[in-house]
Amino acid sequence: MPGKNIHVLPAGDQGWAVAVEGTDGATTHYPSQEEAIAAGTEKAKQDKVELLIHGRDGQ
């Protein structure tokens, strides 16, 4: 079974979120996009999946 990709998404008042595809509530929040990208990069490397970085508009 292939791994589930990691997404860095805007999270409104909570800053930025690192979320695993297909999971409910399995997100971690960070105050800045840079911190979220750093954490997401490590997680994606460990899981051997892709990191998808979204902009402020969620795209």
Image (tube, rainbow, N blue to C red):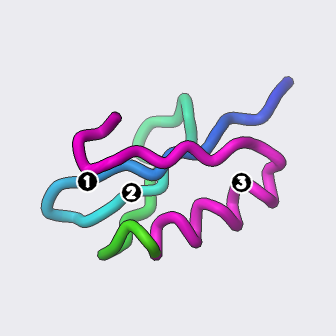
Residue at disc 3, secondary structure: helix
Residue at image point 54% right, 29% down: 22
Q: Residue furthest left?
A: 13
Please name the residue shown 55% across and 43% down the image. 52
**Which amino acid type corresponds to the residue marked 1 in the rendered image?**
Ala
Residue 57: x and y in percent read: 23, 41
Tell me whether the residue at label 1 lies in contact with that at label 2, contact meaning CB atoms closer than 8 angstroms. Answer: yes
Residue at 30 percent across and 75 percent down: it is 31
Q: Secondary structure at mark 1?
A: loop
Label 3 belongs to which residue? Answer: 44
Q: Is residue 57 left or right of residue 51?
A: left
Precedes in sequence: disc 1 or disc 2: 1
Image-based side of 42 in relation to 34, left or right = right
Q: Which mark is residue 11?
A: 1
Marking on residue 17: 2
Q: As shown in the figure, which amino acid type bears the numbered disc 3?
A: Ala
Q: Against 23, is 13 above or below? A: below
Q: CA distance from mark 1 to mark 3?
A: 19 Å
Badge 1 crowding class, 10 Å Cα cut-off, few under 14, some 14 to 19, many 20 or more, is some
Q: Residue 38: x, y in percent?
A: 57, 71
Instruction: Please name the amino acid that badge 2 sits on.
Output: Ala
Query: Mark 3 Cα within 10 Å, few/some/many (few <14, many 20+)?
Result: some
